[in-house]
Amino acid sequence: MRMSKLFVQTLREFPADAEVISHKMLARAGYIRKLTSGVYNYLPLMWRVLKKIENIVREEMDAAGAQELLMPFVQPKELWEESGRWDAYGKELMRLKDRHDRVMCLGPTHEEIITAIARDGLKSYKQMPVNLYQIQSKFRDEVRPRYGLLRGREFIMKDAYSFDTSEEGLDKEYQNMARAYKRIFDRCGLDTKMVQSDSGAIGGSVSHEFMVITDTDAGENDVFYCECGYAANSNHAVSKLPAAVVDGKDYFTETKIIDTPNTHSIEELSKFLNIPSTLILKSLVYIVDKKPVIALIRADRAVEETKLMNAAGGNDIRIASSAEIAELMTEHGFDAVPGFIGPKGMKNIPIIADETVREMKNFVVGINQTDKHQVGTNLSDLGVENLQYADIRLVEAGDFCPECGKPLKVTKGIEVGNIFKLGTKYSKPMNAVYLDQNGKSHPYIMGCYGIGISRTAAAAVEAHYDEHGIKWPISIAPYHVVIVPVNIQDKLQMETAEKMYEELKKAGVEVVLDDRDERAGVKFKDADLIGFPYRVTVGKTITEGFVEYKTRETGEVETVKPEVAVEHLIEIVKKIK
């Protein structure tokens, strides 16, 4: 490809709405253009990157025994009603009607469709196990699409679904997919961690995410990990806590209500009573699926909202507003403001206590009276109804690993893939069954395995860049090398550049010849911004028989003969094919 013909327009500045490196770089380097909120045009350079990632995914999925198909992007309401997700999925599901008033949705995922396909085609145990996958556009109507391709509304995804007759078969395929994913991300030049995670709207009993570890602002989730191999997303991580004072017997000799004026925060209350915050029971009001839920947790710890939502059996969660708390107090005959809320007297409301609360004794708690707390209290003193215990605690760096007891470390991660054990979550309600060797019907045991194709491309930028631009891993770069003649009016420079260009093309190397009549500095800046893995500069040294050969990733520059540069590039490309 000649640069004069390449459809690319680089920008002098980053877009004003770009927040993270990948969004900034991809937009400025001419890979993507925003169409509307969370929806992007993939321009030719981007499309080449995406197709290379797709090809790597296809090769590894096919090698792992999966079979490719393609399912419709538009899906009927009826299938989602069968699975029970039509109402449960939430506003991210884009619903619409066709001209006949049939209700449809834009597919954010394809569990319902693939289960219907299997229901019609897999009738006997002899046909299983089987794994079917597709590479398809998806649409989720995110409330706040941001971070460019990392959290858009429309995106490209590979999703695979396995069908087995036993949990043992599912375990085997789960590990098969985990190994395939490791190969895929290695080939894409990404260092990933496989971490335990929450299954979210997909559902299922077990799930893991493949996270690209990054120190950029794009890391969506905290990943807690240990040298022993334990790793988990923050919404799933568990830990052992350091020793703490959880029995207030040395501070309070009796259970009583005391005045605690102007102690609206844990810090203020702890200082006022001269006690550690570990002796305070914190009460927080959340709204889960439009209904109030009270969370109880030791005051030195924070609630992990996804854990709380799952414990409450909900699909949506947010902290209650001051107005909602005031309304709740009024309904129960109280007038307390935030800071003095407690579980006492709260009837017909789910109350979920973190596991840390089990060990607390003789503690301090709000009693729904402003400027008052009850001290020396135990849960049995409060007459709490509708109480359940669950792990709803956010793990923190320095907590101890649940497996080996060493301190946990924390880093940021970008999710690029996930695997789920679905079990019978979809096959059972949708009556997707097979006949065993005795003629008895059973629902399929299913697994689900997703890779964000467009997210993987963006994550690669987050992991490979510098102040000058992108540094693509060669396996997914739009082109392998750019040849830059410094002066296109110089006959020897152009003849050498053209000869190298033709030789590389003939050998299967993807090469761009920058034949523009621009200053060398402009060409060099564009080459670094776009992120060509290698640059060959044909300048004045060609009169001595040499060209400049630069590796983008390391910045290393060599002066070599043109034929040496060509041979070296051909060998590099052979290794990735």
Image: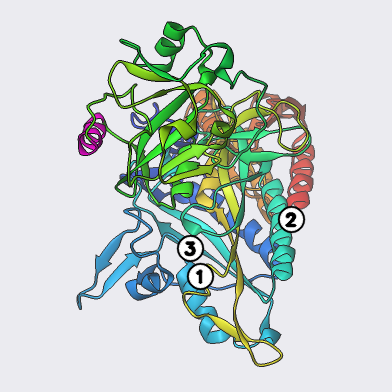
Residue 14 figure quarter = top left
Numbered disc 3: secondary structure: strand
The 10 Å Cα crowd at callout 3, few under 14, some 14 to 19, many 20 or more, is some
Q: Which of label 3 and label 2 is nearer to you?
A: 2
Which label belongs to residue 179?
A: 2
**Do we see residue 521 in this rendering?**
yes
In the picture as drawn, the residue positioned furthest to the front comes out as: 254
The 10 Å Cα crowd at callout 1, few under 14, some 14 to 19, many 20 or more, is many
What amino acid is found at the position of numbered circle 1 in the picture? Tyr
Residue 279, given in percent of the width and then of the height, sits at 52, 19
Q: Does residue 194 appear to the left or right of 103 in the view shown?
A: right
Q: Which of label 1 and label 3 is nearer to you?
A: 1
Q: Which residue is depicted at the point 60% across and 30% down?
A: 359
Numbered disc 1: secondary structure: loop
* CA–CA distance in space, label 2 to label 1: 25 Å
Residue 409, given in percent of the width and then of the height, sits at 67, 27
Q: Which residue is depicted at the point 20% across and 75% down?
A: 101
Numbered disc 2: secondary structure: helix
* CA–CA distance in space, label 3 to label 2: 22 Å
- Give yes or no for contact between labels 2 and 1 (Cβ–Cβ under 8 Å): no
Q: Earlier in the sequence, mark 1 or mark 3?
A: 3
Magenta range is 322-332
Q: Residue 483 colored magenta? A: no
Residue 537, given in percent of the width and then of the height, sits at 64, 31
Q: Does residue 80 appear to the left or right of 170 in the view shown?
A: left
**Do we see residue 31 in this rendering?**
no
Q: Is residue 323 above or below residue 387?
A: above
What amino acid is found at the position of numbered circle 2 in the picture? Arg
Which label belongs to residue 136?
A: 3
Q: Earlier in the sequence, mark 2 or mark 1?
A: 2
Q: Which residue is mark 1?
A: 426
* CA–CA distance in space, label 1 to label 3: 20 Å
